[in-house]
């Protein structure tokens, strides 16, 4: 998303938008809506990445430890997920939380089978 955002903010693109404004172009409204959509999705992606990175240290034992050792990481992982659910602007939907828990439990099952 950063490269797309950078392209939209680049001086050449801004010049073209200014020409469209001066010409009172009909495509300007469509462009503005597209710009808003790009900005919203970029902000959502950045917010999601920020919160999901907080899970990294808690998820690592799910991949590297045996099931007994893995148990020590579970309370921290649950607290991190609770924090995401409480503070994330975008990732706190029930669908995304469910998908996250499904991935965590699937990895736990995989580790137990190994």
Image (cartoon, rainbow, N blue to C red):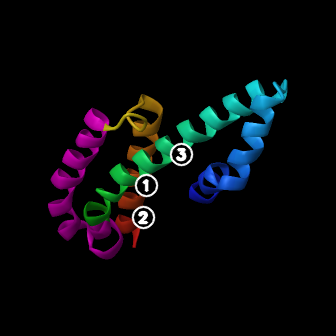
In the image, residue 44 lies at what x, y percent? 48, 41
In the image, residue 27 lies at what x, y percent? 83, 29
Q: Nearer the viewer, residue 60 or 110?
A: 60
Give the mark nearest the N terminus, 3 or 2.
3
Labels 3 & 2 near each other (Cβ < 8 A): no
| Image depth: mark 3 or mark 2 in front | 3
Q: Quadrant of residue 16?
A: top right
| Callout 3: SS | helix
* Rendered image: mark on residue 42: 3
- Residue on which disc 1 sits: 106
Q: Residues within 10 Å of mark 1 (few under 14, many from 20)?
A: few
In the image, residue 76 lies at what x, y percent? 17, 54
Q: Nearer the viewer, residue 90 or 71?
A: 90
**Distance from label 3 to label 2 (Cα)?**
33 Å
- Residue at figure coordinates x 49%, y 47% from the top left: 45
Quadrant containing the N terminus is bottom right
Which secondary structure is most common in the magenta stretch?
helix
Q: Nearer the viewer, residue 70 or 25?
A: 25
| Callout 2: SS | helix
- Residue at figure coordinates x 30%, y 57% from the top left: 55
Please provide the residue range marked out in magenta: 60-87
In the image, residue 85 lies at what x, y percent? 30, 36
Left or right: 56 in relation to 91: left
* Rendered image: mark on residue 110: 2
Give the mark nearest the N terminus, 3 or 1.
3
Position of 111 relative to 15 (above/below): below
Position of 102 relative to 60 (above/below): above
As for residue 50 lying within the magenta part, the answer is no
Labels 2 & 1 near each other (Cβ < 8 A): yes
């Amino acid at each position: 998303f950063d490269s797309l955002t950078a392209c939209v903010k680049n001086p050449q693109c801004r010049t073209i938008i200014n020409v469209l404004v001066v010409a009172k172009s009909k495509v300007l409204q469509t462009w503005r809506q597209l710009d808003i959509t790009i900005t919203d999705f970029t902000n959502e992606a950045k917010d999601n990445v920020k919160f999901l990175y907080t899970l990294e240290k808690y998820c690592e034992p799910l991949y590297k430890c045996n099931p007994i050792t893995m148990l020590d990481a579970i309370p921290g992982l649950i607290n991190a997920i609770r924090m995401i659910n409480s503070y994330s602007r975008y990732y706190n939907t029930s669908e995304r939380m469910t998908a996250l828990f499904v991935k965590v439990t699937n990895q736990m099952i995989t580790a137990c089978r190994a």
